[in-house]
Image (tube, rainbow, N blue to C red):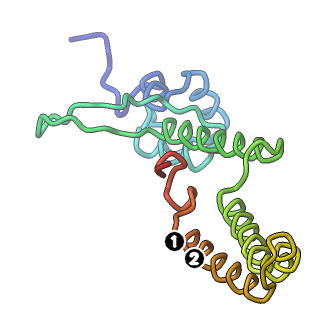
Amino acid sequence: MSGRKKLAGISLAAFAREMGVTPNAVRQRVQRGSLAGSIFPDGSVDSVAARVQWFANSNPNQQRRKVVPKTSKLFKSGEEATENSEYDLKVERMQVDLEAAKINLERLKETTVDREEARRAIRSLMRVFRAAMLNFANRYASDISAVVEADPVQLAGALEEHMRLALAELAKTRAPMDAGTFGDSEC
């Protein structure tokens, strides 16, 4: 007969490995009574009950997590499966937060502009430009007619007609930001 006695559960060290903590951390919880009811009379640990009590009595933000490999073999089907551990998800969230912080920093430095804000500014500028061009014939027809010795009323009408045609052609072209990227338009 062997010198080892049969344990009702798993050892403290095995439970510590399972939880990804040191055996000393498990011993401290046993001494505090945090795992009461999970310890068998022989000193072994009821793994399922202890795990429930462990997570019920701990702050998840301070808990060390065991790093699970990203790929593992499924024994039944033989196919590979990818598993995202909680650690990987936290790392991804931190990367997204870092990217957002970088974007906000660039905005604060005023080295970048919000796309929608730029579109609104371009539309506003184009409205002002269109109003100035439509008013051009009325403002300058008399000055131009004196230089070219033409009838101011006829010159104003011709200038206004051609300005409207030019603005209509301009309205049909796609703005670079509406095209998706700045390099798509032909010169």
Q: Secondary structure at mark 1?
A: helix
**Residue at x 55% of width, y 36% of height:** 91
Q: Secondary structure at mark 2?
A: helix
Percent position of residue 39, x then y: 48, 37
Q: Which of the two residues, 45 or 75, is positioned nearer the viewer here?
A: 75
Question: Which callout, 1 or 2, points to the residue nearer the camera?
Answer: 2
Q: Residue furthest front?
A: 149
- In the rendered image, the quadrant that contains the N terminus is top left
Q: Which of the two residues, 159 or 7, is positioned nearer the viewer here?
A: 159
Tell me how far mark 1 sits from mark 2, CA to CA. 7 Å
Quarter occupied by residue 143: bottom right
Evaluate if marks 1 and 2 touch, with contact meaning CB atoms under 8 Å apart: yes
**Is residue 58 visible from the viewing direction of this image?**
no
Vertical placement of 172 versus 158: above or below?
Answer: above
Residue kind at label 1, given as amino acid type: Lys
Residue kind at label 2, given as amino acid type: Ala
Vertical placement of 165 versus 97: above or below?
Answer: below
Q: Which of the two residues, 109 or 40, is positioned nearer the viewer here?
A: 109
Percent position of residue 149, x then y: 81, 76
Categorize mark 2 by other alpha carbons within 10 Å: few (<14), some (14-19), many (20+): few
Residue under pointer 1: 172
**Residue at x 52% of width, y 64% of height:** 174
Image position of 139 (left or right of 54): right
Percent position of residue 122, x then y: 70, 64
Image position of 103 (left or right of 148): left
**Residue at x 66% of width, y 76% of height:** 163
- How many callouts does the rendering have? 2
Image position of 42 (left or right of 60): left
Which mark identifies residue 168? 2
